[in-house]
Image (spheres, grey):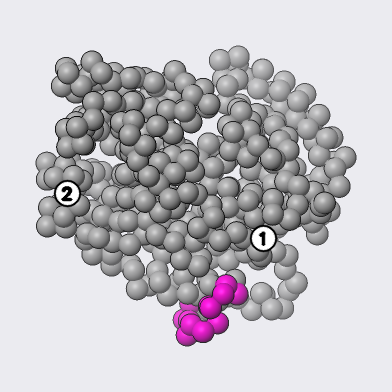
């Protein structure tokens, strides 16, 4: 059996979103996964069949030890992993990111074997598929789910319906994910508390679990202060108190998870737990929404979205306004479009031949016609079943293809 290597050095959510690619490769080869050491315990739970090569990529878990410990780990342990990888006979190497460490790893291998981000003759190169993605990235409102983007690094991805189980309630209460890595993408504690109380009262549930890392402990305390005493007393604050196995165990018992765009959201979808996701600011569900059937997304829609989190907002974070609106609670509970505040789409998760997408049950999805044209264009580009029967999209071809695509030999 052939051996293939996937280099995924990004964080929690990205590791989960690599699932479709890893499943696709595992159908025909022994999969090796190079990742940050802090995520190795999670990877063993997600992909027990993969051979792991953990190294220090971003120093998570070593911060308290200081910069010296991080550098020592990178120079010591990483050299060992580099040597270990060089000794393997990989048929293909899938390098999913463009960090300096990713490119250093890519340089270990024959460039002809590397898919994605390649290092050749001292130069960083892109394969044809990620290069096409760079061209469409200027039009982020079109979007392609990251799970599907990475899956199509290989020409034979597993069907979208084989990635995650259809989500079903488990009877164990509500999980409340406290915050993502970027604060502007997360709802304030008082709004989280209001939504959680409404859901628990409607469903007759009493169990609420606050989920997050130790960094979210202050948010957990703020949520607890905002809850009615009776609910607060029965709430389990698990912020920073679970390991990966413990988080999986909690998620597996839940009826639903309320969450921003986080790794925990993707983990819940991986496990088949229903997600209600709140997307605003730089979070755009058509790029990174929950994968699979049975999930709901509430996507803020303003003319400035999706923005860049690194840029200061000069709009007073107005994409938060629909979630602040007292009427949003009623909309969340009923799903009735008549109850929806302005500025938010209610979307149900769906699948098509290309992968994940979302259909609006409330609000006007103004980008839908252009997005569907784009999905048809990509389906034809990837030679997906039935795509040849769709009408061509010459305007998109002119926008995204370049002469060099035919004149210069390009790698995958």
Q: What element does badge 2 sit on?
A: helix
Which of marks 1 and 2 precedes in the sequence?
A: 1
Q: Tell me, yes or no, if residue 180 can be seen here.
A: yes
* Circle 2/circle 1 CB separation < 8 Å: no
Q: Is residue 133 above or below residue 242?
A: below
Residue 278 position, x and y percent, is 31, 44
**Counting other residues with Cα less than 10 Å from the Cα at mark 2, is it few (<14), some (14-19), or many (20 or more)?**
few
Q: Is residue 110 inside the magenta stretch? A: no
| Residue 321 in sight | no
* Quadrant in the picture for residue 56: top right
Q: Position of residue 143 (x, y in %)?
A: 44, 61
- Residue 290 vs residue 79, the one in the foreground: 290
Q: Is residue 339 left or right of residue 97?
A: left
Q: Is residue 392 magenta?
A: yes
Q: Position of residue 55 (x, y in %)?
A: 70, 31
Q: In the figure, residue 222 lies in which quadrant?
A: top left
Q: Is 231 situated above or below 326?
A: above
For label 1, the SS is loop
Indicate which label's residue lies in the foreground, 2 or 1. 2
Q: Report, in whole angstroms, how far the alpha carbon at label 2 lies from the one at label 1.
A: 41 Å
Kindly identify the residue that appears in the image at 47 percent across and 21 percent down.
242
Tell me the residue that label 1 is attached to. 154
Q: Quadrant of residue 85?
A: top right
**The residue stretch that appears in magenta:** 383-396
Q: Residue at x 52, y 27 (%)?
A: 244
Q: Quadrant of the C terminus?
A: bottom right
The location of residue 15, given as percent across then percent down, is 57, 41
Q: Which mark is residue 334?
A: 2
């Amino acid at each position: 059996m052939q051996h293939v290597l996937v280099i995924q050095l990004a964080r929690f959510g990205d590791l989960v979103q690599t699932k479709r690619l890893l499943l696709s490769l595992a159908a025909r080869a022994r999969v090796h996964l190079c990742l940050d050491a802090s995520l190795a315990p999670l990877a063993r739970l997600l992909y027990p069949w993969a051979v792991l090569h953990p190294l220090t990529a971003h120093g998570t878990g070593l911060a308290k030890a200081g910069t010296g410990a991080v550098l020592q780990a990178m120079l010591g342990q990483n050299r060992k992993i580099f040597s270990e990888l060089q000794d393997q006979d990989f048929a293909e190497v899938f390098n999913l990111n463009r960090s300096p460490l990713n490119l250093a790893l890519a340089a270990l291998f024959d460039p002809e074997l590397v898919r994605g981000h390649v290092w050749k003759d001292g130069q960083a190169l892109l394969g044809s598929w990620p290069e096409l993605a760079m061209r469409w990235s200027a039009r982020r409102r079109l979007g392609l789910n990251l799970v599907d983007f990475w899956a199509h690094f290989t020409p034979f991805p597993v069907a979208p319906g084989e990635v995650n189980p259809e989500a079903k309630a488990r009877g164990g209460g509500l999980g409340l994910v406290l915050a993502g890595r970027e604060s502007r993408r997360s709802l304030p504690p008082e709004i989280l508390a209001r939504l959680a109380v409404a859901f628990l009262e409607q469903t007759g549930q009493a169990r609420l679990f606050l989920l997050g890392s130790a960094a979210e402990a202050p948010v957990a305390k703020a949520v607890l202060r905002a809850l009615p005493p009776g609910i607060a007393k029965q709430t389990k604050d698990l912020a920073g108190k679970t390991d990966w196995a413990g988080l999986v165990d909690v998620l597996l018992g839940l009826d639903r998870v309320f969450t921003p765009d986080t790794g925990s959201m993707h983990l819940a979808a991986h496990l088949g737990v229903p997600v209600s996701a709140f997307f605003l600011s730089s979070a755009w569900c058509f790029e990174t929404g929950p994968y699979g059937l049975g999930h709901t997304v509430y996507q803020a829609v303003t003319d400035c979205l999706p923005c860049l989190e690194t840029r200061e907002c000069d709009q007073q974070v107005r994409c938060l306004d629909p979630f602040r609106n007292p009427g949003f609670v009623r909309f969340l509970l009923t799903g009735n479009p008549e109850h929806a505040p302005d500025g938010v789409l209610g979307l149900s998760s769906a699948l098509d031949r290309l992968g994940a997408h979302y259909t609006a049950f409330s609000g006007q999805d103004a980008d839908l016609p252009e997005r569907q044209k784009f999905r048809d264009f990509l389906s034809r580009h990837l030679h997906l079943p039935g795509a040849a029967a769709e009408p061509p999209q010459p305007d998109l071809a002119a926008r995204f293809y370049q002469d060099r695509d035919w004149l210069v030999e390009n790698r995958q």
